[in-house]
Amino acid sequence: VVLRDAFEGDGLSKRAATRLADLDRIASAHAAFPVLVVVHDAKAGGAAEKSKGEARAAAAAGALPAAKARIAPVWAGAGAPVADPKTSGNRNARLEIVFVAPRAS
C-alpha cells in the first residue's frame, strides 16, 4: 500500500493515520504476515534527513500496534525512486506498507 503526503512535519497526516488504522485492522486479522513500513524521500539527503526518515518510519510503525511484534520500520531514503528524481518533484516521497507473505511450512 502506497501513501503519499503521509506526513505533516514529523508526524502522520490525518489521512495517513486513518489509513494506517484501517491497515492495522488488516494486520490484526492476518497475524502470520510480517509488515514492512518503508519511508522513501524525494531527494537524497544527509544525516539530518536520515534521522528524520527513521523517526517517520518509527511513527508509522507505531500506528500499527497489531503488528508490533512482526513489524520492520525502514528508511529507504531516495534509493528506490519510482520516477526520475530530476523531473518528478516530490513524487518519490512516499510511505509504503508491505504485507510480506509468510514462509510456507
Image (tube, rainbow, N blue to C red):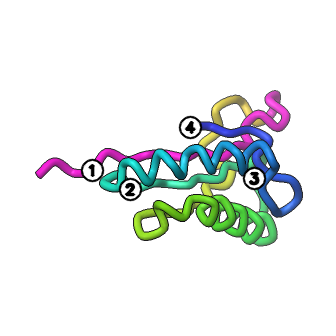
**Whole-number angstrom distance, CA of label 2 to CA of label 4:** 14 Å
**Whole-number angstrom distance, CA of label 2 to CA of label 3:** 28 Å
| Residue pictured at 74% horizontal, 71% vertical | 51
| Residue pictured at 78% horizontal, 47% vertical | 43
Q: Quadrant of residue 11?
A: bottom right
Q: Earlier in the sequence, mark 2 or mark 3?
A: 2
Q: Which residue is mark 4?
A: 1
The numbered mark at residue 102 is 1
Name the secondary structure under disc 2. loop
The numbered mark at residue 34 is 2
Q: Nearer the viewer, residue 8 or 66?
A: 66
Q: Earlier in the sequence, mark 3 or mark 1?
A: 3
**Left or right position of 98 against 76:** left
For the residues bearing labels 3 and 1, Cβ distance under 8 angstroms: no
At label 2, which amino acid type do we have? Pro
Q: Nearer the viewer, residue 98 or 42?
A: 98
Segment colored magenta: 86-105
Which is closer to the viewer, label 2 or label 3?
2
| Residue pictured at 59% horizontal, 44% vertical | 22
- Indicate whether residue 19 is drawn in magenta: no
For the residues bearing labels 1 and 2, Cβ distance under 8 angstroms: yes
Name the secondary structure under disc 3. loop
Q: Residues within 10 Å of mark 3 (few under 14, many from 20)?
A: few
Q: Residues within 10 Å of mark 2 (few under 14, many from 20)?
A: some
At label 1, which amino acid type do we have? Pro
Q: Earlier in the sequence, mark 4 or mark 3?
A: 4
**Whole-number angstrom distance, CA of label 4 to CA of label 3:** 23 Å
